[in-house]
Image (spheres, grey):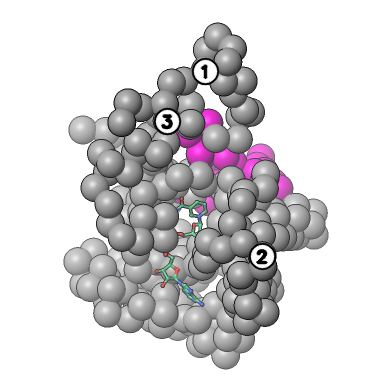
């Protein structure tokens, strides 16, 4: 069994979209490393269930990241309950696979609103709380699709490139104020977003032959990356983009040349 450290003992984090998927993986890892966590999500039932399972070092409250009043309430509640806020993890996100021709204006606005504007207004609201704790960090969930483009994901890519740029600019502003801002760029993590029809892993992973890792990743892989960035181990990481993508963005294969993977047999 892997040894988990307690690098986050004494710290409190608020995680958005924490009820399932990658957010849940982050919550579980933060708790294992000794943090108190305010789990937030629009999925109240799943969030409450997770909080009940994890016990006294966590609490749940609903937070729609597009709502300024939800942010104000959730942040105050976190400080009331745990006495401080050291880390904000802007993880909540949405995705819709469609060509640009087939996205509605409402789809486009909604994707940018949740993924990018939610991250921006949440970070803005959290600054005074993290400053009151004496400094800390903000971890923003971008994507492998925030580093290179992907078909069917024009609005999503725009939102995730936006999160990456926002992270860099905010890192410059907040570094001198003792708040480190960094981004994570997951690729191919097996969650309800990536696998909405719940295809078994064995079948699902066949589509990943094009990844150097030859398989999809797990929410725990992103939990480990977020715990690192939130911990003092990452005290010199400011504006860093951390890819956790099974090698997807390492480059591209020349399929006819030596070293390329072979597609699985049908
Ligand atoms: N799964 C992947 O392969 C992958 C890859 C790259 C980036 N990401 C990013 O990681 C993050 C988590 O994705 P996931 O795969 O766990 O997806 P998921 O759909 O399983 O989880 C996303 C969570 O965000 C919540 N959410 C959605 N809209 C919200 C809102 N307005 N306010 C608050 N919460 C909201 C959902 O209820 C859900 O619990 C997202 O930002 C996603 O873009 C995922």
Give the class, few, some or many, for how many residues have Cα within 10 Å of label 3's Cα (few <14, many ≥20).
some
Towards the viewer: 66 or 101: 101
Q: Which residues are magenta?
A: 227-247
Q: Which residue is disc 3 drawn over?
A: 209
| Circle 1: element type | loop
Give the residue at x 66% y 65%: 100
Label 3–label 1 contact, CB within 8 A: no
Towards the viewer: 158 or 154: 154
Q: Which residue is disc 1 drawn over?
A: 260
Residue 241 located within the stretch drawn in magenta: yes
Give the class, few, some or many, for how many residues have Cα within 10 Å of label 1's Cα (few <14, many ≥20).
few
Give the residue at x 65% y 73%: 108
Mark nearest the camera among 1 and 2 is 2
| Circle 2: element type | helix
Lateral position of residue 214 relative to residue 120, left or right: left
Q: Report the Cα–Cα distance between label 3 and label 2.
A: 27 Å
Give the residue at x 66% y 40%: 236
Label at residue 100: 2
Mark nearest the camera among 3 and 2 is 2
Q: Is residue 118 above or below residue 134?
A: below
Label at residue 246: none
Q: Position of residue 15 (x, y in %)?
A: 46, 66
- Choose the circle earlier in sequence order: 1 or 2: 2
């Amino acid at each position: 069994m892997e040894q988990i450290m307690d690098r986050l003992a004494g710290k409190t984090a608020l995680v958005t979209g924490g009820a399932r998927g990658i957010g849940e993986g982050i919550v579980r890892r933060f708790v294992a490393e000794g943090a108190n966590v305010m789990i937030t999500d629009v999925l109240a039932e799943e969030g409450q269930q997770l909080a009940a399972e994890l016990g006294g070092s966590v609490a749940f409250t609903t937070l729609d990241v597009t709502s300024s009043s939800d942010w104000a309430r959730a942040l105050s509640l976190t400080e009331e309950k745990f006495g401080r806020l050291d880390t904000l993890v802007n993880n909540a996100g949405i995705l819709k696979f469609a060509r640009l021709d087939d996205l509605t204006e409402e789809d486009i606005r909604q994707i940018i609103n949740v993924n990018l504007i939610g991250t921006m207004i949440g970070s803005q609201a959290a600054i005074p709380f993290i400053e009151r704790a004496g400094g800390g960090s903000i971890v923003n969930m971008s994507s492998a699709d925030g580093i290179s483009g992907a078909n069917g994901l024009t609005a999503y890519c725009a939102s995730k490139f936006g999160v990456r740029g926002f992270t860099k600019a905010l890192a410059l502003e907040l570094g001198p104020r003792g708040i480190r801002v960094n981004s994570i760029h997951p690729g191919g993590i097996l969650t309800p977003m990536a696998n909405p029809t719940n295809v078994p892993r064995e079948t699902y992973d066949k589509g990943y032959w094009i990844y150097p890792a030859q398989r999809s990743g797990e929410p725990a892989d992103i939990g480990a990356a977020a715990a690192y960035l939130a911990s003092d181990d990452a005290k010199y990481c400011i504006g860093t983009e951390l890819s956790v993508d099974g090698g997807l963005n390492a480059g591209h294969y020349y399929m006819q040349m030596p070293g390329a993977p072979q597609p699985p047999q049908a």
